[in-house]
Image: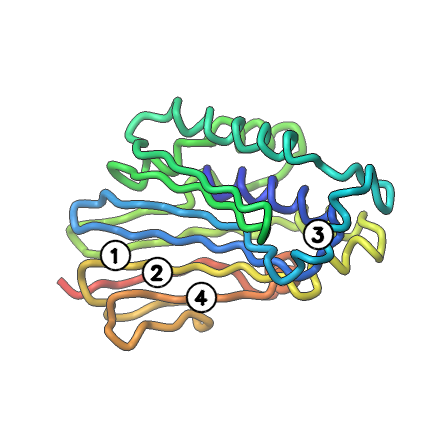
Amino acid sequence: MIKKAFIYFSLFICISLCTSCFEILEEITLNKDGSGTVMVTLNMSKSKTKLASLMLLDSINGYKIPSEDEIDESFKDILYHLEKTPGISNIKKTKDFDNYIFTISCDFKNVDNVNAIFKELIKKQNKNNYTNFTTTNLSYNPSENVFNRHFTYDDAIKKSFNTLKNEDRKVFDNASYTCIYRFQDKVKSVSNTNAKIAPNKGAVFLKIDALSLILGEKNVENKIQLIN
């Protein structure tokens, strides 16, 4: 789905540029009928001075530094998959190379449309690499007014991380993954103990450091019960 593809893109950029201060932000606004908007942001603005210097190099620590044109091509690949997916519309992207902030967003008719974006690619990844990533990341039950952010941890994440050189692992030291979910109905409860309900009860906020997510110590699994 859009998040998974954008995460792969984000980690490629961050490892290549050796910046440890970055945030991936997942935002979903859900309407009562199950439609909504999803936006994913890669924010590396806190490292923009270092990044501006690194972008002048060809490679570092054995990784090729992607050019602006190559980053553009990565965006085009993601947008291509979005455009092919039924139920997806109003696709937008922003690229800020001054502050190194990149976003992709789209509207969806229902959360199954979002799950379908890269469903086949995830299946292929699981088959080729013997991983077990879920192809259902979101679900919404309107009769029970329950929104679920599904997540199944796979040890392959940790194994891949352990194959990195020590200096490359440092990329994740100050990195984070943040989820913000907004609703038209008020939030009654959440299942993830790290999640916080906004004071107005209209949103849920969850921020996890990247290392905890990679090592399986924390995750983004969350059952959000809305008030009928």
Three-letter code for the amino acid on which mark 4 is drawn: Leu
| Marks 2 and 1 close (CB-CB < 8 Å) | yes
Q: Please report whichever mark, 2 or 3, sits nearer to the chain's N-terminal start.
A: 3
Judge left or right: residue 12 versus residue 1.
right
Residue 174 in percent (x, y) is at 66, 66
Instruction: Classify mark 3: helix, strand or loop.
Output: helix
The residue singled out by tag 2 in the image is 223
Disc 1 from disc 4: Cα separation: 17 Å
Disc 2 from disc 1: Cα separation: 7 Å
The residue singled out by tag 3 in the image is 51
| Marks 1 and 4 close (CB-CB < 8 Å) | no
Instruction: Classify mark 2: helix, strand or loop.
Output: strand
Q: Which mark is residue 206?
A: 4
Three-letter code for the amino acid on which mark 3 is drawn: Leu
Out of 97 and 171, give the one closest to the viewer: 97
* Mark closer to the observer (3, 4): 3
Residue 24 in percent (x, y) is at 53, 54
Judge left or right: residue 101 versus residue 187.
right
* Mark closer to the observer (4, 2): 4
| Marks 4 and 2 close (CB-CB < 8 Å) | no
Q: Please report whichever mark, 1 or 4, sits nearer to the chain's N-terminal start.
A: 1
What residue is rendered at 57% in x and 41% in y? 132
* Mark closer to the observer (3, 1): 3
Crowding near pointer 4: few (<14 within 10 Å), some, many (20+)?
many
Disc 3 from disc 1: Cα separation: 41 Å
Disc 4 from disc 2: Cα separation: 12 Å
Q: Please report whichever mark, 3 or 4, sits nearer to the chain's N-terminal start.
A: 3
| Marks 3 and 1 close (CB-CB < 8 Å) | no
Out of 54 and 107, give the one closest to the viewer: 54
Q: Please report whichever mark, 3 or 1, sits nearer to the chain's N-terminal start.
A: 3
Disc 2 from disc 3: Cα separation: 37 Å
Crowding near pointer 3: few (<14 within 10 Å), some, many (20+)?
many
